[in-house]
Image (spheres, grey):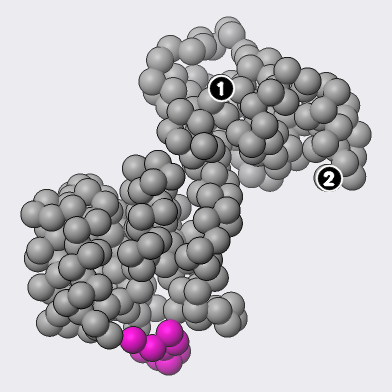
Amino acid sequence: MENSKSENKKINLFIADNADESRADFISHFKDSEKFIIAGQSKDGNETLKALSQSAVDVLIMDIVLTGIDGFEFLEKAKKELGNKLPKIIITSSLSHNGFIEKALSLGVSYFMIKPIQMKSLENRINDILGLGGVGNSNPIPKQNFKNMRTKIIEEKISNVFITVGIPAHIKGYQFLREAIKMAIDKPDIINSITKRLYPSIANKFETSSSKVERAIRHAIEVAWNRGKIENINNLFGIKVYNQNEKPTNGEFIALVADKMLMESIGD
């Protein structure tokens, strides 16, 4: 299948997802698009395989969890049966273990995104893998370069956490806090040296001072609490971590998010 499309021809998408709500969200987003069209949808792996063999699809957006056959078995069959009719594939899934990601990439997946999906990011990924939008690269994430994929997934998961807890992207603490969590994932012991190592490292990267980093992160956390997102925070971590009158320290919040990522095998 060609990696580029003429500007006046819509990009055909197929949605394969076991969750009715997820399929509905994708369809709702793309139904009035001037650039994309939903060519089909299914919750079943075998039905998806049959549909792709009978129609031209540019990008398959699929979850690993399907009825009939799971996503991995689907990918194995699709490579053998579809040949050059195999579309570009983006996996959107809540399953984010390293092993799942590596296996998906080895089976020909172009991109792996973690639910919940930001639709604008999904559109960007579609444009990337088709070589559109001025990117000029039909395969922006080399399949062998797992480190880049891992970094992208971590960043997307952190962004989703910030959306959930109510930390807006426009404040300075957003970038500092994201960098701090990434550092704590890569080097968990750095949380024990937050003032001597973590703040100075972030300050050096962003050409500012450690005290400004500390204050900006504190402000970002306070914004979330002042927005009354405590219930979202507790739901995110699966336990009642805090109430409205309890605010975590910078180190506690960084460690909490980083630990969540590590427990989900993102940072192994």
Residue at image point 49% right, 39% down: 266
- In the figure, 229 relative to 141: above or below? above
Instruction: Indicate whether residue 34 is drawn in magenta.
Output: no
Q: Which residue is mark 1?
A: 256
Residue 164: horizontal and vertical position, in percent?
48, 34
Choose top left, top right, bottom left or bottom right for residue 187: top right
Graded by Cα atoms within 10 Å as few (under 14), some (14 to 19) or many (20 or more), the crowding at tag 1 reads some
Q: Is residue 105 left or right of residue 182?
A: left
Residue 82 x %, y %? 20, 79
Quick check: 117 left or right of 217?
left
Q: Main secondary structure of the magenta part?
A: loop
Residue topped by disc 2: 206
The residue segment tinted magenta is: 1-9
Residue lying at the far top of the rendered structure: 245
Q: CA distance from mark 1 to mark 2?
A: 23 Å
SS for dot 2: helix
